[in-house]
Structures are given as structure tokens and as C-alpha cells.
Image: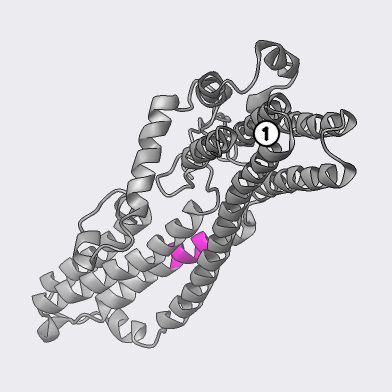
Amino acid sequence: MSKSFAVASGADAFVEPSEETRPDFKELKTIEKQRREILLRAELPFWRILMFWSGTCLREIVSDSLVWTTIIIFTGIRIFANVVDYVPESVELLQKTNVGILGGFLSFFLVLFVNQTNGRFLEMYGFSKACSGRIQDVAGLAKTQLPIEIADRLVRHFNAAHIAGYVGLNAIGQGSPYSKTYFFDHYNEEAKLLTPAEMKELSRHDMDHSGLCMKELVTWCQQDVTDARLAGHIDTYQEKFFHEKILDFRAAMDGMYDYTDQPPHFFYIHFLVLLSALYLPLFAIDTAYAAGWGEDKFVGLDILQGLIVFLQCVFVVGLRSLATNMIDPYGDDLEDLSVINYVEGTLEICSTIMNARQQ
């Protein structure tokens, strides 16, 4: 879910990514290639999975200041414990505390947060695949029931609506890396989706900052179907079936927009971050004081306890980062959905359907 932000004034100000800051098509293809490679890692042996850096929690953990603060607190206390020969009075007092209760609550809320964002992620994946599926349905129906010229125009408009829909996501939420210049125009030129006259007609909409272009293209598809019925190529029942598929596509695309526009409540996320920021330093202090003082000091135990503190950081920060990365699956993270794969796959299948020949 990483985006290009520029601080203006204060902690709450940000600047929405502009077309200039978004990746060009070559960069998008590079990201897409890495995404597809990461998806293939899921079934590798555990020892090979541990060898990867990209697409893992390690990058988030090593760059998180809370992790380093926690480790520094533990290390500082243990260095002090190995320097002095007496047992501070605070050691006995800390033995009466129970940091584990806070850790239990935090674990529950973190796992719940991950479960919620994972549900959002899979739901939005379903919307993306549903969009592709409805376009293929209409392409098959158009190929078999409409004259080739009308069928070709309908499928072109439908694929254009699909691509424009992803570009329009930049208008809401955290923005989108897919722009009209580097994304829509590329596929429009490659697949000859819209004519210059049709592009001029759509120019009244700002595709990069609005979903209205997608909405109008969907309406064009409905008009294509209605025109085919008025011309006598299909009856009202067939027309109704076409419209149902087109409206199902629009509903799926609207679902993507709705989820993107309403992420999990910031109150909830702030609550989890606050708990993490309080818990990890307290856990480091509690573990460091319990590692031994005076004659009970042992370097091996210090190392073991330090490893436990680090693993706790991995658990807390790793789960939090996993959840936040799944909030917006249409960004430029390597863990986000493979939009280019969906678009190109749909275009290829539609081309196959429209060029199908039966001996």
C-alpha cells in the first residue's frame, strides 16, 4: 500500500500522487512480473522461503523504528546489568508486574485486524475477477448472437471500461499507480479499443481523477445492446441477459471503489499502533530485568532473551504490517493484486473469442 506522499504542513497534510509521480508502463510491468514470481513462492520448501527478502515482512521489520527502539532498550538494560555487581531494588518491583496480559490483548486484536483486512483483500480480488468474467461472458454472447461489427464495438467498449475503471481508482482512497497516460493509453493503442472520435467524446471526464469515464463506457455498452435489439439482431430476452452481465460488471467495479473509499477505521488502526508502541518497550524492560542480575548473570541467557524480544517484535510489527499492506490491494506494493495480469488476460481471451472459427 505504499504511495508517494509529500508533507505540506502538519502531520495530517499530504499531497495526492500526480501523474508524474506514478510509474510508467515499463515500471508497472516490472512490478507485475515480481508479483507473479512472488505468487509462485507459496508452495516452496520452508528453507527456500526463508531465503527471500522481497515480498516478506523482513523489509518492514528492519525499517520500523519501534523494533530498533525495543531492541536498544533491552540491550541497554542488559549492558547495565553486566556492568554492575548489585541487584537494583527495581528488579523486585518489576517481578510483580504482568506484561503478558497486555500482550494477550494485543495478540487478539492484531489477529482480528489481519483477518478483517484479509477478508477485504479476497473480496476485492473477487470483484476484479468478476469484472473479467463478465466481459468474457458478454464477448461470448456477442460473438454468437450479434453481427461482427456490433459485437466488436461492444467488446471494445467493455474492455475500455475495464481499464478505465482501474485508472479511476486514483480518485479515491490512497490513489492508484495506474494512469491514463501510462496505462489506459497504452492498451488503447495496442488493442485499438476506442477511436479518436470516441476518445474526444470522453475527454470531458478526467479519467485520472474520476470513475465517471468508466460509468459512461458501461452506458455505451448498454446502448450498443439496445441498438442491436432495435435493429432486430436480438430479442428482448437476449437483450435483458446482456444488460444483466453489463450491470453485474458495473456492480463489481463499484464494489472495488466502495472498499477503496472506505478503509478500516483510523481509530482502530491508531489503537493498535498505540498498544504496540506501549507494549514492546514494556516487554523489553520486563524481559531484560528477568534475565538475571548479580551472580545470576549469564551471557547465553542474555542472547536467548534478546532473541525472544526480537521474535516478539517480528510477531507484533509483522502482523501489523501484513494487515496494513492488505488494506489497499490496488497500489504499487509487490503484495498487491495483479491488475495488469487481469487486464491482459481479459484482452487475450476476448480476442480468442472474437476470432474463434468453427470448421
Q: Residue 250's spot in the image, x, y percent?
A: 73, 43
Q: Quadrant of the C terminus?
A: top right
**What residue range appears in magenta?**
272-278
**As drawn, is 111 to the left or to the right of 213?**
left
Q: Tally the numbered discs.
A: 1
Indicate the secondary structure of the residue bearing disc 1.
helix
Q: Is residue 344 above or below residue 41?
A: above
Give the residue number, with chain letter if any, for mark 1.
158
Q: Is residue 321 above or below residue 304?
A: above
Quadrant housing residue 199: top right
**As drawn, is 247 to the left or to the right of 190?**
right
Quadrant housing residue 266: bottom right
Q: Residue 285's spot in the image, x, y percent?
A: 32, 72
For image coordinates 44% across by 27% down, the residue present is 23
For image coordinates 55% across by 32% down, the residue present is 355
Q: Residue 22's spot in the image, x, y percent?
A: 48, 27
Q: Is residue 2 above or below residue 280?
A: above
As shown in the figure, which amino acid type bears the numbered disc 1? Phe
- 359 or 216, which is in the foreground? 359
Q: Is residue 274 magenta?
A: yes
Q: Residue 268's spot in the image, x, y percent?
A: 60, 61
Quadrant housing residue 265: bottom right
Which SS type dominates the magenta stretch?
Answer: helix
- 335 or 275, which is in the foreground? 335
For image coordinates 32% across by 62% down, the residue present is 70
The structure's colour scheme is one colour
- 109 or 223, which is in the foreground? 223
Mark 1 surroundings: few (<14), some (14-19) or many (≥20) residues within 10 A: many
Q: Is residue 176 magenta?
A: no
For image coordinates 69% across by 26% down, the residue present is 153
Q: Is residue 214 above or below residue 103?
A: above
Q: Is residue 223 visible?
A: yes
